[in-house]
Amino acid sequence: MTLDDFIALQETEDVPAAAEPLFQRKYQRAVPDFPHHVVASYSSAQGVSPLVCYIHFTDCGDILLGGGACVDDRVLRQMSVAERDLIRAAGGIYQHALRWSVQHFAPRFGAIFGYCGDALAERIDRAVGFQSTMHDHLLVYWTRNEDARRRRQMIEKANSFAPF
């Protein structure tokens, strides 16, 4: 068995209905109503596919801003021990979804940024390949080999939206 046997990852342009209560529970606000939405759904043995992870990304032309990630621990508890073991081996469902997301978006953007004030989320972001910038809480995943001047420009552009 692999994660792909029971976790489906996809980008969608529309806010998934199941993301709203999950996002509200974590952030006490509405899910952003603009793209990009990445969802991880769990295909259970009972044939239902509840949302287990949601991440929002904002297109800013040459860069992408990632934020608003949330995991539904109630869905994780519904999984079998073997399924949870596979998720744990992948670094967790957020790490699995974030790794998929950066690979998915890399061809379209020069850099993907995250604004992170949570120690656990930051550890996961770094495990995926995000790096520090000169700004507190602003992390970057470089998708291309840009020169130092261009990197500074992209970092400053992302920082102008912080916090996101």
Image: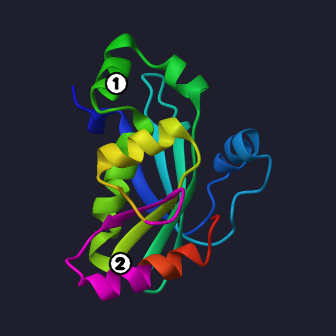
One can see residue 8 in this view = no
For residue 109, the mark is: 2
Give x and y (percent) for residue 84: 38, 20
Query: Is 73 on the left or on the right of 134, as rendered?
Result: right
Taking depth in this image into account, of 90 and 82 the one nearest to the observer is 90
Q: Disc 2 on helix, strand or loop? A: loop
User: Which residue was labeled with disc 1?
Assistant: 88
Q: Is residue 61 above or below residue 35?
A: below
Q: Which residues are magenta?
A: 134-154
Question: Residue 150, image x and y in percent?
Answer: 33, 87
Vertical relation: 57 (above or below) 29: below
Q: Is residue 163 magenta?
A: no
Q: Residue at x 35, y 21 (%)?
A: 83
Q: Nearer the viewer, residue 90 or 137?
A: 137
Q: Name the kind of residue labelled 1 in the image.
A: Arg
Left or right of 48 on screen, residue 102: left
Q: What kind of element bears circle 1?
A: helix
Is 164 on the left-hand or right-hand side of 120? Answer: right
Amino acid type, callout 2: Phe
Q: Compared to 74, does 69 lie above or below?
A: below
User: Can you give x and y, in whole percent of width and height, for residue 157 in the image?
Assistant: 51, 82
Q: Earlier in the sequence, mark 2 or mark 1?
A: 1
